[in-house]
């Protein structure tokens, strides 16, 4: 794969350095890291555009009954 076709030498060198720091020198792993570096982050979720059902807020369940202190066994 010609990584230098799509990336600058500096960008590729930084990606290879990162890959080696992660413990790999596999060309496919380097190509994957390069794609991840160049990927645009997803757009923020606009709650106003969600369907009505997706905007329903549900209360968080009360998990106090599962607290470690409450689960301690009492020896007979």
Image (cartoon, helix red, strand yellow):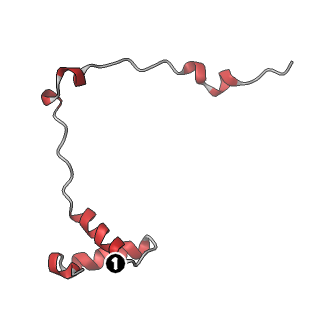
Q: Viewer-proximal residue, 52 or 65? A: 52
As drawn, 75 above or below 43: above
Percent of width and height locating residue 57: 30, 19
Q: How packed is label 1: few (under 14 Cα within 10 Å), some, or many (20 or more)?
A: few
Residue at 28 percent across and 80 percent down: it is 13
Residue at 23 percent across and 21 percent down: it is 53
Q: Would you say 16 lies left or right of 49 here?
A: right
List the single residue furthest toward the left: 49
Quadrant showing the N terminus: bottom left
Percent of width and height locating residue 74: 79, 20
Count of all numbered marks drawn on residues in the image = 1
Quadrant showing the C terminus: top right
Q: Would you say 11 lies left or right of 72 here?
A: left
Residue at 30 percent across and 67 percent down: it is 32
Percent of width and height locating residue 48: 13, 27
List the single residue furthest toward the right: 76
Percent of width and height locating residue 20: 41, 76
Q: Would you say 30 lies left or right of 53 here?
A: right
Q: Quadrant of residue 26?
A: bottom left
Q: Quadrant of residue 15?
A: bottom left
Tell me the element at label 1.
helix
Residue at 29 percent across and 72 percent down: it is 31
**Residue topped by disc 1:** 27
As drawn, 49 above or below 38: above
């Amino acid at each position: 794969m010609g990584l230098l076709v799509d990336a600058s030498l500096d960008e590729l060198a930084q990606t290879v350095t990162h890959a080696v720091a992660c413990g790999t020198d596999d060309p496919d792993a380097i190509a994957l890291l390069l794609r991840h570096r160049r990927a645009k982050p997803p757009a923020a979720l606009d709650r106003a555009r969600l369907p009505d059902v997706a905007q329903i807020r549900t209360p968080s369940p009360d998990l106090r009954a599962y607290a470690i202190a409450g689960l301690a066994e009492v020896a007979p």
